[in-house]
Image: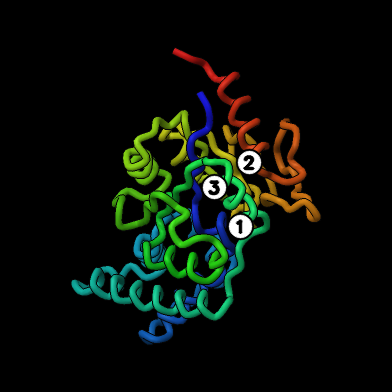
Amino acid sequence: MSLQAVIFDVDGTLADTEEAHREAFNASFHQFGLPWEWDAALYRDLLSVTGGKERMRHYCERFFPDFLADPQAGSTIAALHREKTRHYAELVAAGAVAARPGVVRLIGQLHAAGIRLAIATTTSRSNVDALLAASLKTLPPDIFEVIGAAEQADDKKPSPAIYRWVLERLALSPDECLAIEDSKNGVRAAQAAGIPTLVTECVWTAGEDFTGALAVLSDLGEPDRPCRAVQTHRSGCGYVDAGVLRSWYDEWQTGRPHA
């Protein structure tokens, strides 16, 4: 069996988005006159909850439970999230978010090699579109064959729901694919769907438990800027190209138990 598709996470994987998300959350809180402020340390902790509305609700449960007692709390959170999404799109369009090292190069190489490309994320589709239009604008607009976003799965990562949705639309089995993630929740989601997973950790997820990943790298690297191997026994990790991914996938196929 050969590698047929690579499925990318978005936030922290395709691009360093989380600081822009944090700024957008705070802008929406201030806009609504709420005394909420998410600093970097708090936001890193809140990232254990996937999904923007879910993250706000979790925050309120911890720090502002009286807010949730209001019958309008759900609609207020939804309105906050809409404004947060608008602020985020403006930041992305203004160039505040950069693609991570090696991402654009690797996607182009995979496409040229005939490997199908997809996205599996718990962020909203509008956030994905904003990122593709700005930070990854040098790529063809239709390079991702399937885009699974928050609207396609009520159960957020670490649930495998979004990966299963993407697999169904690719009409592929999990063991024909490889996922690239940056967080423990993402790794757990991909693994629960049966997909081997490469991790490129980011500043927000460094040090998390990535047990079971094919490898954990600082990023995908570039020929003139090697990545750092955080956890790997595999060869060829100066930078990740289509050949390296195929080699690691083949190693995984050879080493895994077969029915």
Tell me the residue that label 1 is attached to: 104
Q: CA distance from mark 1 to mark 3?
A: 11 Å
Outermost residue on the top side: it is 259
Tell me the residue that label 3 is attached to: 111
Q: Is residue 189 visible?
A: yes
Where is residue 59, by image quadrant? bottom left
Left or right of residue 132: residue 110: right
Tell me the residue that label 2 is attached to: 242
Image coordinates of residue 68 in percent, x first then y, are: 28, 68
Q: Mark 1: give few (<14), some (14-19) or many (20+) Cα within 10 Å.
A: some
Q: Earlier in the sequence, mark 3 or mark 2?
A: 3
Q: Are marks 3 and 2 in contact (CB under 8 Å)?
A: no
> Disc 1 residue type?
Val
Instruction: Count the labels in the image.
Output: 3
Q: Is residue 190 above or below residue 143?
A: above
Classify the position of the C terminus by image quarter. top left
> Disc 2 residue type?
Ala
